[in-house]
Amino acid sequence: MKKYILIAILAAAGLWSCNEDSLDASITVDSNFQSSAVGRDGWIHGYAGYAATADTTQLDTVAATALLPRGLDTTQYGYRILSRYSKGNMFAYLKKRVSGFTPNKSYEMTFQVDLATRYSASAIVDKVTFKAGVSRIEPVTTKLTSGIYAFNLDKGTGTQVGKDVLLSGNITSTNPDSRYYTILRYSNDGQPVTLTSNEKGELWFYAGTDSDYKDTTVFYFDRIIARFKEL
């Protein structure tokens, strides 16, 4: 089945009703990156944690939509993230603004990220942590007076989890070989979490790897999906 990109308000039998005057519906944000280089569906990549003085011998970053690698469906696209910072911890992430919510309204949300990865636990255990969250403010990278490019949300550092993280885990596969496999990660162990939209009726998503691994890390976002119920 072909993948698709969808941002929609679903109103169907068994779900919540929706009309022109209300958003008390099931809202689904579903990004599969199924297109060419323009198929990013509003997602923007970023990097944080590295020094402004880092040169190409220490730092390497590449992010773009690309066909999925061998071992998966190579006719389909994902968002490929490559990162390497030999001098310390670095956060490589995607972010996306979603609008259309009722301003300052509480929602119940479930959040899932599908990753294509080829790493075994023995390769990067305790060195690369996957983190994701949803925020009322935009996730950005800012340059500090210390010369470090920092992430503005509280994601924690390395395996430590900050207050703005809803999903935390790793990018390792249980398979013993180095072929790519798709792994699924769920916020709050698949249970709904409650959050509130900002005054503009927006929420910002982010997802990425918090890495102390000094060598190159490559993985693909295969799908990012969130479902909301207005409370």
Image (cartoon, helix red, strand yellow):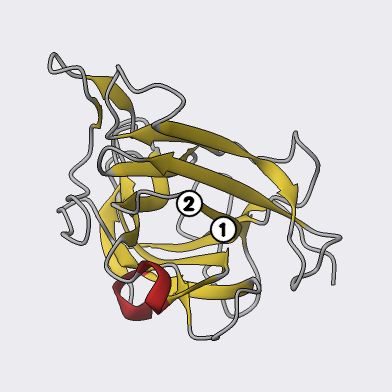
Residue ID at (57%, 36%): 62
What residue would you read off at disc 2? 23
Check the image and report above or below for 16 versus 131. Answer: below
Q: Residues within 10 Å of mark 1 (few under 14, many from 20)?
A: some
Q: Could you say whether the residue bearing mark 2 is in a helix, strand or loop?
A: loop
Residue 165 visible? The answer is yes
Check the image and report above or below for 197 versus 175. Answer: above
Residue ID at (33%, 38%): 103
Report the quarter where the C terminus lies: bottom left
Q: Are marks 1 and 2 in contact (CB under 8 Å)?
A: yes
Q: Please tell me which of labels 1 and 2 falls first in the chain.
A: 1
Residue 102 visible? The answer is no
Q: Is residue 220 left or right of residue 137?
A: right
Q: Residues within 10 Å of mark 2 (few under 14, many from 20)?
A: some
Q: Is residue 155 left or right of residue 225?
A: left
Which of 65 and 158 lies nearest the eye of the viewer? 158
Which of 27 and 174 lies nearest the eye of the viewer? 174
Residue ID at (69%, 50%): 33
Q: Could you say whether the residue bearing mark 1 is in a helix, strand or loop?
A: loop
**Would you identify the image quadrant in which residue 160 lies?**
bottom left
Check the image and report above or below for 125 versus 64. Answer: below
Kindly identify the amino acid type of the residue bearing the numbered disc 1.
Cys
Q: Residue 42: x percent and y percent?
A: 59, 36
What residue would you read off at disc 1? 18
The label shown at residue 226 is none
Q: Residue 23: x percent and y percent?
A: 48, 51
Estimate the spatial distance between the alpha carbons at disc 1 and disc 2, rounded to whole Å. Answer: 6 Å
Report the quarter where the N terminus lies: bottom right
Kindly identify the amino acid type of the residue bearing the numbered disc 2.
Leu
Q: Residue 165: x percent and y percent?
A: 25, 56
Residue that extends furthest to the top in the rendered view of this protein = 145
